[in-house]
Image (cartoon, rainbow, N blue to C red):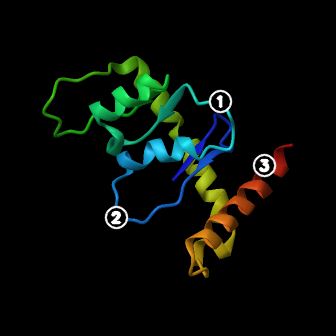
């Protein structure tokens, strides 16, 4: 999981197995952030449409912006104003595309997750050095 800022630069990284749902990994990813400050807004896809997640993030001072799923049973909680920011989600996808330029991350030669996370962080450092 990765969180990017408005320029598409990495803010937080978290490595977990593929089995847990993304909603359960958001808070762990926020705890593993590279900066001290917590982002004010998070933009996610339809998988992040969860009222309990919204409440937990709101307690931390973070607004979750995610479109509602089509099969949602509860009443809608967001209107179109906040969802206009959803079209900026491509910046996170751009960060992942930058990371996938490093073949070692795409193929994942490392057996241990700690080594893989270290190479992901190394890739993020290389991305950050381009901008500073």
Q: Residue at x 36, y 20 (%)?
A: 80
Q: Residue at x 49, y 27 (%)?
A: 85
The answer to which of marks 3 and 1 sits earlier in the sequence is 1
Q: Is residue 59 above or below residue 50?
A: above
Task: Identify which residue, 73 or 11, lies in the foreground.
Answer: 11
Q: CA distance from mark 3 to mark 1?
A: 18 Å
From the viewer's perspective, tell me whether residue 129 is left or right of residue 34.
Answer: right
Task: Identify which residue, 24 or 43, lies in the foreground.
Answer: 24
Q: Depth-wise, is mark 3 or mark 2 nearer the camera? A: 2
- At mark 1, the secondary structure is loop
- To which residue does mark 3 refer? 128
Q: Position of residue 71 (x, y in %)?
A: 16, 40
Residue found farthest to the left: 73
Q: Position of residue 38 (x, y in %)?
A: 59, 30
The answer to which of marks 1 and 2 sits earlier in the sequence is 2
Residue 37 — which label? 1
- To which residue does mark 2 refer? 19
From the viewer's perspective, tell me whether residue 129 is left or right of residue 42.
Answer: right
């Amino acid at each position: 999981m990765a969180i990017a800022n408005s320029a598409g630069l990495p803010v937080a990284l978290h490595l977990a197995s593929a089995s847990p749902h993304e909603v359960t990994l958001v808070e762990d990813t926020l705890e593993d952030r590279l900066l001290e400050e917590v982002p004010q807004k998070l933009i996610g896809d339809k998988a992040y449409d969860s009222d309990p997640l919204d409440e937990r993030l709101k307690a931390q001072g973070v607004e979750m912006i995610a479109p509602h799923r089509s099969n949602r049973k509860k009443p809608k909680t967001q209107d179109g104003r906040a969802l206009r920011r959803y079209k900026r989600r491509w910046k996170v996808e751009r960060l992942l595309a930058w990371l996938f330029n490093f073949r070692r991350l795409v193929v994942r030669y490392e057996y241990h997750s700690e080594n893989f996370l270290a190479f992901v962080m190394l890739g993020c450092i290389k991305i950050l050095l381009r901008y500073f």
